[in-house]
């Protein structure tokens, strides 16, 4: 990647909050480059530091260490009103005393744009988010989804270099949420603005993003396109957090991984050190159910869980290790049945903890 | 109206009856007496003669020369009215200027220490108003603490006359009424969602613009309540202008008191009281209307 490709560059950012029980490290040496025009998603469990990272980029917090660059310019010490970066807040934070149109015009007015230009831009943005009819309403006269659109419009109106979105969809119901996901993608596509999106919903992250950064405990675990993160998680946490997966723990002996259940699986990615403890992972959709004896693993079916287009077959290996296979079609095995499990050699991956 | 609604309505009246009775007897009764007295003739030494007269109302604005009977505008009275309004408006403004940062400071403290700060705001109420006013007098006096300090610092060579001026009255009233502004402001700011301020700051507003364009419009109800609570008693203030303003710099309250005391003109005092009441009512109506309109315009 070249230098001018970077919209936001975070260099070794660290942030601690004081608390009664000593300082809480919200961000621990985070380095990250977000490219121009991309839809970048920060994904991670509650409290992992996603909001903190966003607030650092917006300027509401200053890092204890590290620098933040916007298109190559160091903005670490700039206040929020001097950063061409706008935020869509989780709670929307619309101004209750202003109409929809005045909310959207706010940023442009503060920038001192001519009234005519502001008016034209507000009309354009209202059209973009399909809220033309609501221009004169007050925020409290809007539904949640409409407020969401206004919050988006307000942040987009000044045409920021980067738009920050902190879990903007979490307050919406499922159907509206899906609709807004598409809407967001469309807006990002049409405006070409760099989006930094925060969510703790992995499905949302996978479907919407160009790249995803997975966080845990104030640290970035892995950054990459959704497919890569799903197919090649760097550690157990990422594998577990993104999609569903199976973990098989074993010990390396003679170039193979021996499971407590008795089976030996080929060690992926070269021979491990003799006696090393190894965690293997295989996604449910990569497991095939065979007749007993015909496969790499033997298991007993515990339960079948249907969910629309497919079913999850929950099984147990002989030592009790749970394992799940995704079944698309055909005959489903009965609970209690013995089955053989097979998978393509490439489906198996070794993970660090 | 259903039977249930009728029953509820009756219950409501019954429950509020004691308060209503008290209000009727305590406020309307005396007010009625004042209204009646304002249309009577003054008694020889005090009190009233039971004869209808509009003289009191005439005397509010005009004075008659004792010797030749010519009529002149009573500019002394007018200046008292003007001073009262001016000082009350200034007091309201100053309590707002000092009250806003105070309220903001308290509202942004951690929840545990907030109660302590609020408690400190109420401490002055523990002492009698008169005593507090005399304390201020001690500060402002020519040989007082303020002048003493300024002279010792070499900033002035002779004492500045503050006591017995409008400035002294203003300082006193601002001090006395500050909590009445700070507390409603605090209540409004405490409910203010700080993310609104962040959103404005994010949208290129300077700190000053955040305050003016977002914080103040949203906490407007607190500003309105505080202004009313300060302006109304300021306009009728009695103790503070009496002690700090001396005999000369009267406000309406002192002027009214004068009519019932040394002036021995009860009907004039009653008429002045009614005018004060009307002024308060007018000011409130105009102010609340304007505030509501500003709120509707955004
Ligand atoms: N103002 C604050 N004071 C003290 N600690 C804080 C503050 N803000 C955040 N923290 C702590 O910092 C850590 C990271 O918080 P942050 O809000 O960034 O998490 P998050 O990933 O956004 O979580 P969520 O998904 O729940 O919003 C948490 O442990 C949190 O408790
Ligand atoms: Mg958060």
Image (cartoon, coloured by chain):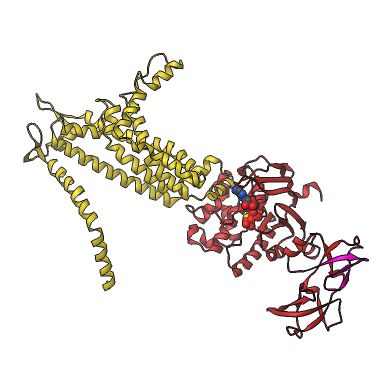
Chain colours: A red, B yellow
Residue B266 point in image, percent of width and height: 14, 36
Q: Residue furthest top?
A: B157
Depicted B99 relative to depicted A144: above or below: above
Magenta stretch, residue numbers:
A243-270
Closer to the camera in the image, A12 or A228: A12
Residue B110 point in image, percent of width and height: 52, 45
Numbered disc total: 0
Q: In what quadrant does ligand 2 lie?
A: bottom right
Query: Is B193 left, or right, of A28 in this rendering?
Result: left
Closer to the camera in the image, B29 or B1: B29
Closer to the camera in the image, B10 or B54: B10
Query: Is B240 left, or right, of A185 in this rendering?
Result: left
Closer to the camera in the image, A327 or B268: A327
Residue B136 point in image, percent of width and height: 35, 28
Quadrant of the image containing the C terminus of chain A:
bottom right
Residue B94 point in image, percent of width and height: 40, 35
| Residue A158, visible in the rendered structure | no
Q: Residue at x 50, y 62 (%)?
A: A142
- Where is residue A73, by image quadrant? top right
- Where is residue B170, by image quadrant? top left
In reply to whether residue A265 is colored magenta, the answer given is yes
In reply to whether residue B84 is colored magenta, the answer given is no
| Residue B245, visible in the rendered structure | yes
Q: Residue at x 34, y 43 (%)?
A: B229
């Amino acid at each position: 990647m070249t230098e001018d490709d970077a919209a936001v560059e975070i260099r070794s950012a660290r942030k601690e909050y004081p608390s009664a029980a000593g300082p809480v490290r919200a961000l621990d040496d985070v380095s990250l480059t977000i490219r121009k025009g991309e839809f970048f998603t920060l994904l991670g469990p509650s409290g992992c530091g996603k909001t903190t990272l966003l607030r650092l980029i917006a300027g509401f917090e200053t890092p204890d260490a590290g620098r933040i660059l916007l298109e190559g310019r160091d903005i670490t010490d700039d206040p929020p009103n001097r950063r061409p970066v706008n935020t869509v807040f989780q709670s929307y934070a619309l101004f209750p005393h202003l109409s929809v149109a005045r909310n959207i015009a706010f940023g442009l007015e503060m920038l001192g744009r001519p009234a005519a230009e502001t008016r034209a831009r507000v009309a354009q943005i209202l059209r973009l988010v399909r809220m033309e009819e609501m221009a004169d309403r007050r925020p409290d006269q809007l539904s949640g989804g409409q407020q969401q659109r206004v919050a988006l419009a307000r942040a987009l109106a000044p045409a920021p270099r980067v738009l920050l979105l902190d879990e903007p969809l979490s307050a919406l119901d499922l159907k509206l949420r899906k609709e807004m996901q598409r809407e967001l993608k469309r807006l990002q596509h049409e405006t070409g603005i760099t989006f930094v999106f925060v969510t703790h919903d992995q499905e949302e992250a996978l479907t919407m993003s160009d790249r995803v950064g997975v966080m845990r405990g104030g640290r970035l675990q892995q950054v990459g396109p959704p497919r890569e993160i799903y197919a090649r998680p760097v550690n157990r946490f990422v594998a577990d957090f993104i999609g569903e997966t199976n973990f098989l723990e074993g010990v390396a002996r003679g170039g193979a991984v021996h499971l407590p259940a008795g089976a030996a699986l080929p060690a992926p990615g070269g021979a491990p050190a003799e006696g090393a403890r190894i965690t293997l992972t295989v996604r449910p959709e990569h497991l095939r159910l065979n007749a007993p004896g015909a496969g790499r693993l033997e298991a007993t079916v515990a339960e079948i869980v249907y969910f629309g287009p497919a079913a999850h077959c929950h099984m147990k290996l002989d030592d009790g290790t749970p394992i799940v296979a995704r079944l698309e079609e055909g005959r489903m095995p009965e609970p209690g049945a013995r089955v053989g499990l097979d998978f393509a050699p490439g489906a198996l991956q070794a993970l660090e903890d | 109206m259903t039977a249930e609604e009728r029953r509820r309505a009756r219950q409501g009246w019954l429950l509020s009856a004691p308060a209503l009775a008290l209000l009727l007897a305590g406020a309307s009764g005396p007010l009625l007496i004042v209204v009646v007295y304002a249309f009577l003739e003054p008694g020889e030494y005090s009190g009233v003669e039971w004869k209808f007269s509009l003289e009191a109302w005439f005397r509010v604005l005009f004075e008659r020369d004792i010797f030749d009977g010519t009529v002149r505008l009573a500019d002394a009275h007018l200046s008292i009215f003007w001073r009262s309004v001016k000082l009350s408006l200034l007091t309201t403004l100053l309590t707002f200027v000092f009250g806003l940062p105070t309220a903001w400071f308290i509202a942004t403290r951690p929840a545990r220490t907030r109660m302590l700060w609020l408690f400190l705001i109420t401490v002055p109420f523990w002492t009698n108003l008169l005593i507090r006013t005399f304390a201020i007098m001690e500060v402002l006096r020519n040989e007082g603490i303020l002048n003493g300090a300024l002279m010792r610092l070499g900033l002035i060579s002779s004492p500045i006359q503050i006591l017995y001026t409008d400035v002294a009255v203003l300082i006193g009233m601002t001090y006395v009424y500050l909590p009445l502004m700070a507390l409603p402001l605090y209540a409004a700011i405490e409910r203010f969602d700080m993310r609104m301020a962040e959103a404005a700051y994010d949208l290129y507003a300077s700190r000053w613009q955040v305050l003016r364009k977002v914080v103040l419009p949203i906490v407007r109800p607190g500003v309105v309540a505080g202004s009313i609570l300060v302006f109304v008693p300021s306009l009728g203030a009695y103790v503070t202008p009496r002690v700090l303003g001396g005999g000369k710099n009267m406000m309406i309250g002192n002027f009214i008191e004068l009519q019932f005391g040394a002036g021995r003109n009860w009907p004039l005092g009653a008429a002045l009281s009614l005018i004060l009441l009307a002024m308060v009512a007018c000011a409130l109506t105009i102010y609340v209307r304007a505030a509501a309109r500003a709120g509707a315009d955004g």
